[in-house]
Image: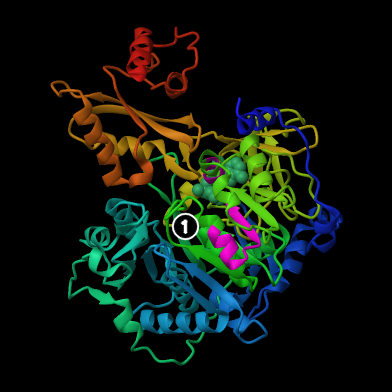
Amino acid sequence: MPEEEKHLDTLLTENRTFTPSEAFKARANVNDPNIYERAAADPEAYWAEEAKNITWFRPYNKILKWDPPHAEWFVGGKLNAAYNCVDRHREGSRKNKAALIWEGEPGDSQVLTYDMLGREVDKAAHMLSNLGVKKGDRVAVYLPMIPELPISLLACAKLGAIHTVVFGGFSSKSLQERIVDADAKLVITADAGWRGGKPLPLKANADEAVAGTSVEHVLVVDRVGEQAKAEKNPDRDVSWHELIAKQPSTPFPAEEMDTEDVLYLLYTSGTTGKPKGVTHTTGGYMVGVNNSMRTVFDLKDEDVFFCTADIGWVTGHTYIVYGPLSAGATTVMYEGAPNYPDRDRFWDIVEKYGVTTFYTAPTSIRTFMKWGPEYVEKHNLDSLRLLGTVGEPINPEAWMWFHKYIGKEKAPIVDTWWQTETGCAMIAPLPGITATKPGSATKPVPGISVDVVDHDGHSVEPGNGGSLVITKPWPSMLRTIWGDDERFRNTYFGDFPGIYLPGDGAHKDEDNYVWILGRMDDVINVSGHRIGTAEVESALVSHSSVAESAVIGRSHEVKGQAITAFVTLKEGVTSGDEIIKELKQVVVNQIGAIARPEELVLTNELPKTRSAKIMRRLLRDIAEGRDIGNTTTLADPSVVESLQAAFKR
Ligand code: PRX
């Protein structure tokens, strides 16, 4: 067995705990374990103390108004998120400090100091305002990972508009659904972005998406130029570059936002077909994300923070834009693929900019493992002092690899459990206090109360599993689902009144550490991205040849889960590779490449109970090659054998 494999093999049973080093502990922002008790004794007082790190234009008069399931935090307070992320740092010693370091995929780069970023945000806010965008309007942002992306978000925040970012990998149809649901007035996009050395077109999708909607203007950034060939619609399109050059250089006054004014919407998948517009408001979100930087990420003024997520997801919102900037840090963003031009791109960035804190997803770590340590070893990673993971449970092998090859057995790892809905990390170690166990996100952060409960909502004993719940309101929690408060109430608070249900299963060990087991609903976690089975199924059945479909997530070595679709065709349709290809493409066209099924299995029948419910669990067993036990509840037990044969093929 090669040395590396032997190493990994011994780790499969890894059950050591890793305590922070004395050196790390001594310098940590938080190193007094009493913080947990103090926060638990009076969470509101804890959060009020934390709210002092945010600049308020007008002080709040009540910490929390909790009318379950509706929370208002820092009631009566006025503030502006962009002011907190940019302007307040311009006024002080951070004026000329690097706020944003941007690395483009082809090798171009840009560094914006807080002062420079402030000027860009002001110009962009003038520009949006001149395009008729006002406080409370929705702006859809469909951009690649270029500086104009965070600048757009901050400009919206500065004038009080609500941004809704749509990940560039989503299709025109997905973009349109979000534009319509949010009733957006403006779309900001680019001709294309760079990914893996090729232009990834965006403008063409945006054109399709805005047809027939309320969108008045499409503001277009020229990123790729010649090779992207985006068509121009003279009545609707405006050029970012042309327009921004005409804006005054005067500061744009920060809109005084109420603490509960909406900062952004971010759509995420749920159990039914329609994505949910998770709604975050200003005051609580800013307090939460700012706290998270200081406690979970131990952020210091000299830190250089590199989160590898795309700003199209919540991780990018919180840990590329609002968190690091509100804390006055230097945040690094990278446009493209991790293997372009070679597999050492991230490590090259770490070395080039002296990154101190590196935050990524387990799926990426498993990819680095596959590529091998030689790409890491080409670079000096001495600057790294803290590592983080997010998005899915991390397998101990990946944790140990990260610890050994990236953290050089020195840097603590914070495995952070959270969701689009929670705004920032809820369960995570405090790196100067918590002993970590590979594979566990450990314990709730101070000020957050979680539990694992059984069907009746009773706390399970240590050593048992159940549903994860968050038992008390917290500042950065979602406030509703845009336009559908009833769905908000039913989805998250329908099971146990006043108790938030994230939809994850979890296990509590003898030390009360939480081990996340994964989603309990029909949501698949592909490479740390949430995709609803219902969304994929409805894309498939929209095809005229499809009679019925069932979609499941099966475990996958690198992606965590992969999408497997089972499809029955209408009578008379010829089955074969052609139709399989076509159907996969339908999903790509309707949702985006991230939802492309890994396998699509054609079958004459789907396994159903006698009451005609599709047995998804059985499909998962088939896809994962498990023995199928008792099938007597099936209407037609012979379906199993034919499916197993079809899956093997
Ligand atoms: O199942 C959990 C998983 O990702 C879901 C949230 O997905 P999303 O809203 O897209 O946000 C992802 C980034 C915050 C959760 O319900 N998840 C997230 N972090 C972890 C995790 N599962 C296990 N461990 C984690 N650290």
Residue farthest along the left direction in this orientation: 572
- Quarter for ligand 1? top right
The image shows residue 514 at horizontal and vertical percentages of: 70, 39
Asked whether, in this view, residue 197 is left or right of residue 18, the answer is left
Q: Amino acid at mark 1?
A: Asp
The image shows residue 255 at horizontal and vertical percentages of: 51, 81
User: Quick check: can you spot residue 361?
Assistant: no
- Quarter placement of the N terminus: top right
**Quarter of the figure with residue 147:** bottom left
Residue 352 is a magenta residue:
yes
Q: From the image, tell me which residue sits under label 1.
A: 310
Which is more toward the observer, 591 or 335?
335
- Quarter placement of the C terminus: top left
Asked whether, in this view, residue 396 is left or right of residue 158, the answer is right
Which is more toward the observer, 323 or 140?
323
Seen at 57% across and 66% down, the residue is: 352
Seen at 52% across and 38% down, the residue is: 370
Seen at 78% across and 64% down, the residue is: 29
Seen at 61% across and 71% down, the residue is: 326
Decide: is 186 above or below 178: below
Residue 116 is a magenta residue:
no
Decide: is 148 above or below 646: below
Looking at the rendering, the stretch of residues picked out in magenta corresponds to 348-366
Q: Residues within 10 Å of mark 1 (few under 14, many from 20)?
A: some
